Image: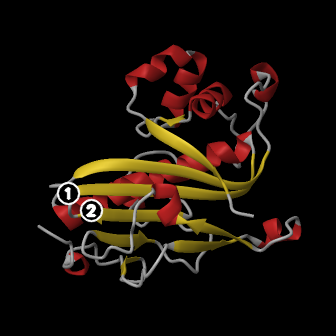
Amino acid sequence: MNNGTKIHTRIAKNLSKEHFFLVDDIEDEYIIIEEYSEEERAISKSSHICVNISKITDLNLSDKNRFKVYRYGNPDLKMEKSYFNNLKAQTFKNKKCDISLIILDHIKKTTYIVCAEVKRTLKISNLFDAREQIISSHIDLNILNSLLTYNSYNVERMFFIIFENYNISRNNNITSMQLLTDSKGRPIPTNLILEEHKTNTIYYTLDDREDMNSIDKNISTLKLWSHARLSFVAANK
């Protein structure tokens, strides 16, 4: 399997070419424009963030003989849900991050799974939300990658949270932060989130609320979970 060009004859029937497609018009740098929600626009001087994928991945994606770039999701939709929610067991199975890409490097025979979440202001509560969306999208992209390459390429993970404003201190008082809750009113596992933030790490197999709460009480057990680098990227002004 060399280039995954037959993907659209093998993907699930409910996933159309609008939702998973080859990006074939990269002439220079690959830039994705992410629009803010109406709520974010009301408190922001701008309406969008430009994400330079070529820059943050450090890949020359305009080299079409080497790279093939596939995008998962509809760029015109906000608050997208996973298209594989019935195949996943984690408690946040319906979520999907803003930017989800599969990049095939045919020279290195490597698949880059790129998951990026864009936040206007980065703070503890939406950092927790972002990690859920990234992990959910990572699972989806692994499913799609297996169809593209029959899992014959090595996989490298690139996880990014892109922000315009930064509102997290690496010296947060953990005790006082414990009162934070998610959108469903459940306590956020703050010790876990702050540890991932402090170490620029995401434990991408940690996708169940019960497991997260258990580890939140005993951070030392994090070493048992698979992890990858989580990069925090300031958006271009």
Instruction: Identify which amino acid the numbered label 2 is placed on.
Output: Asp
> Which residue has dot 2 on it?
105
Q: Position of residue 131 (x, y in %)?
A: 56, 45
Residue drawn at (42%, 77%), measured in percent from left and top?
19
Q: Secondary structure at mark 2?
A: strand
Q: Position of residue 134 (x, y in %)?
A: 51, 51
- Judged left or right of residue 39, residue 227 is left
Relative to 233, residue 226 above or below: above
| 99 or 81, nearer to the observer | 99
Residue drawn at (38%, 58%), measured in percent from left and top?
140
Q: Are marks 1 and 2 in contact (CB under 8 Å)?
A: yes
Q: Is residue 79 in view?
A: no
- Judged left or right of residue 151, residue 164 is right
Residue drawn at (22%, 55%), measured in percent from left and top?
108
Q: Which mark is residue 109?
A: 1
| 224 or 149, nearer to the observer | 149
